[in-house]
Image (cartoon, coloured by chain):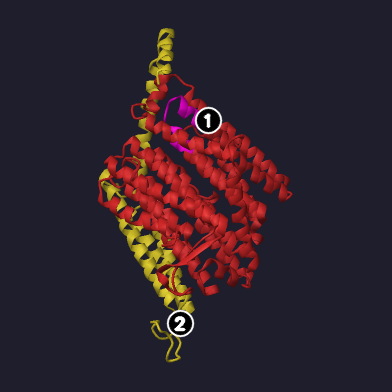
Chain colours: A yellow, B red
């Protein structure tokens, strides 16, 4: 049984990582969902035991009780994964809305181009005007007034 | 109601209420600041209680001890919670005075405060994970909102990289549960002691990698500068002054309390990684010109000291790690808050922050650095002492570079990069208030030192008893 779980988790995690390395944002999100499920399965597998439902008062019939903790943990992890997926999809959508693309390469190229443009504009402003002595005086005067 | 739950009881409803209100209105902002302030006051009371009476604990919901979720506060958790919530309150106050343009910011800050408080106060690893995710998800959302919306790319990468880290953490939790059959720090520490070192080491490495990815430790830090650059200064202050505390806390909690033997085994590796990281952070910081980028690399470098101190271990090393982390959180908050304001008082505040980072008395940073030197001497390691000295000298260089770049230039040039129209007396006084705290802790460091010592003693008591 352990081997089966290990194989499934390995395959899921591997596929997830493969998708994470793509530049398409939605593939990245799907990759993350796969990885989150791999983690949930690991949690499940870490305390898998056969037995009765663990409802208090437990173990009256003397039979072993299934470990309830891992199930609670997995449930919590699933909920968190769900919330995170929603957040990531919202983020991807806001990227799409501002850039009209969900390709990370395109988006980062655009952002880099914008940053370069901004810098060029600032450099132009810096070199355009060299203050003379009178202006310096005036500025020093300004400086005193907070 | 027990004092342990009160901060959570204050923050939780406040966060929900704030998320229903429009965060762009000042009233909502001040409401959130007030809630964080109240939580901070409660945590300060809790910290003094812990300092006097020792660790406090409570089992939620009145369940028997091993069934219910246990909240447990020791000096380590209390001091980190107190500082983080304080930093959040101050940064949010600054953001409110500056003017918040997106409606979610106050509510998200409250949720982040809630997550941080919860994770520092819990006694259970899974609970830690849940609160951790709460804090991190708020941080992802904040990083995408805080910059004004034009740069979603860094926020997306931040979220993806950190989520991979958190699923690794979850897998490590599963492995730890499999190996020890429990998830409470102290019980795990006891059960992990007789484990086969190869199993336990694997788990320890998974935790280390998970924290490393999430908190930008050395080989996994590439997302960090972009994020700090793309958000506004108050939010960068929240990230580096409050959120980054999770890294130091996680290393101390999981390394110092839960898996101390594995840390001992890996101590040389920790010291090497820490040293590399310190050098790398400082050199990168010197090479940068943008203030926030410099500060981001400086944060990367400074977490290296914590690793070195953890590697040294013992009461001196662990105490040094705690004291340094606290001082560092305050320094970074101060520097980020003061970084884009102008005026004489703010320049002085920035200077105090710079001196504190370099470790010049009378600032809080001096005692952080002094404790680290002490740890280096205690470990009989000349290399560690030299590293600390060089690190301090380099931080002088890069901080004065940006000081010069930002403050000693013609007014017109500076004004373009640091517009003054928003910088009112309120913003300045927030930055100056943090500077005063840093100075006061430098002049009267006894509480800080005592807390560090107590935290180290408690960690070692658990590790020794296991």
Which stretch is magenta? B334-351
Q: In which quarter of the image is residue B208?
A: bottom right
Whether residue B444 is visible: yes
Image-quadrant location for residue B117 = bottom left
Q: Residue A49 carries which label?
A: 2
Q: Residue B27 carries which label?
A: none
Give the letter of the chain under mark 2. A
Residue B49 at what x, y percent from top left?
A: 52, 56
Magenta residues, dominant SS class: helix
How far from the left and from the top, in percent, is residue B214? Answer: 47, 54
- The disc numbered 1 marks a residue on which chain? B
Q: Give the image location of residue B226, x and y in percent.
A: 43, 42
Q: Quadrant of residue B279?
A: top right
Crowding around mark 2 (Cα neighbors within 10 Å: few <14, some 14 to 19, many 20+) is few
Q: Is A133 rendered above or below residue A90?
A: above
Left or right placement of residue B422 versus residue B208 in this view: left
For disc 1, the marked residue is B351
Q: Do labels 2 and 1 share a chain?
A: no
User: Residue B390's x, y, as percent?
Assistant: 65, 38
Q: Nearer the viewer, residue B305 or A131?
A: B305
Looking at the picture, does residue B306 appear above or below residue B59?
A: above
């Amino acid at each position: 049984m352990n081997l089966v779980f290990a194989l499934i988790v390995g395959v899921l995690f591997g596929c997830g990582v493969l998708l994470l390395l793509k530049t398409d944002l939605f593939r990245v999100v799907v990759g993350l969902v796969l990885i989150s499920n791999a983690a949930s399965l690991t949690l499940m597998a870490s305390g898998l035991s056969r037995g009765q439902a663990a409802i208090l008062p437990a173990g009256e019939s003397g039979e072993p009780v299934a470990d309830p903790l891992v199930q609670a943990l997995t449930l919590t992890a699933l909920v968190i994964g769900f919330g995170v997926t929603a957040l990531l999809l919202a983020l991807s959508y806001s990227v799409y809305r501002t850039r009209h693309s969900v390709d990370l390469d395109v988006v980062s190229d655009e952002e880099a181009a914008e940053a370069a443009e901004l810098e060029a504009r600032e450099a132009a402003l810096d070199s355009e005007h060299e203050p003379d002595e009178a202006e310096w005086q005036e500025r020093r005067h300004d400086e005193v007034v907070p | 109601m027990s004092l342990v739950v009160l901060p959570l009881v204050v923050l939780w409803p406040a966060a929900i209420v704030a998320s229903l209100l429009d965060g762009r209105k000042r009233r909502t902002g001040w409401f959130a600041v007030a809630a964080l302030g109240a939580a901070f006051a409660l945590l300060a009371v809790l910290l003094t209680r812990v300092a006097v009476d020792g660790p406090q604990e409570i089992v939620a919901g009145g369940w028997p001890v091993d069934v219910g979720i246990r909240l447990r506060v020791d000096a380590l958790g209390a001091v980190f919670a107190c500082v983080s919530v304080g930093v959040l309150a101050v940064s949010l106050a600054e953001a409110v005075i500056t003017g918040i343009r997106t409606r979610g910011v106050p509510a998200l800050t409250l949720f982040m405060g809630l997550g941080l408080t919860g994770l520092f106060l819990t006694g259970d690893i899974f609970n830690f994970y849940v609160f951790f995710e709460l804090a991190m998800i708020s941080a992802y959302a904040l990083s995408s909102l805080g910059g004004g919306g034009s740069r979603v790319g860094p926020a997306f990468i931040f979220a993806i990289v950190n989520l991979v880290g958190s699923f690794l953490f979850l897998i490590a939790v599963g492995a730890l549960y499999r190996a020890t059959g429990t998830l409470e720090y102290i019980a795990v520490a006891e059960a992990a002691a007789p484990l086969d070192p190869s199993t336990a080491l694997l788990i320890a490495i998974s935790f280390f990698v998970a924290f490393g990815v999430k908190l930008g430790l050395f080989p996994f830090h590439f997302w960090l500068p972009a994020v700090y650059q793309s958000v506004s200064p108050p939010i960068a202050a929240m990230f580096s002054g409050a959120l980054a505390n999770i890294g130091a806390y996680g290393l101390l909690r999981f390394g110092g309390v839960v898996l101390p033997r594995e840390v001992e085994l890996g101590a040389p590796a920790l010291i090497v990684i820490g040293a590399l990281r310190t050098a790398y952070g400082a050199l990168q910081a010197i090479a940068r010109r943008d203030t926030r980028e410099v500060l981001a690399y400086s944060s990367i470098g400074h977490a290296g000291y914590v690793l070195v101190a953890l590697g040294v271990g013992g009461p001196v090393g662990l105490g040094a790690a705690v004291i340094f982390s606290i001082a560092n959180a305050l320094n970074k908050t101060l520097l980020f808050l003061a970084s884009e304001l102008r005026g004489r008082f703010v320049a002085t505040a920035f200077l105090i922050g710079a001196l504190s980072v370099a470790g010049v008395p009378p600032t809080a940073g001096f005692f952080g650095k002094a404790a680290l030197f002490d740890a280096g001497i205690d470990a009989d390691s000349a290399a560690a002492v030299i590293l600390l000295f060089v690190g301090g000298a380099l931080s002088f260089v890069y901080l004065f570079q940006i000081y010069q770049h930002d403050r000693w230039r013609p007014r017109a040039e500076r004004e373009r990069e640091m517009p003054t129209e928003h910088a009112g007396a309120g913003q300045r006084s927030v930055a100056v208030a943090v500077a005063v705290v840093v100075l006061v802790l430098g002049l009267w460091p006894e509480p800080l030192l005592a807390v560090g010592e107590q935290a180290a003693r408690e960690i070692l008591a658990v590790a020794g008893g296991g």
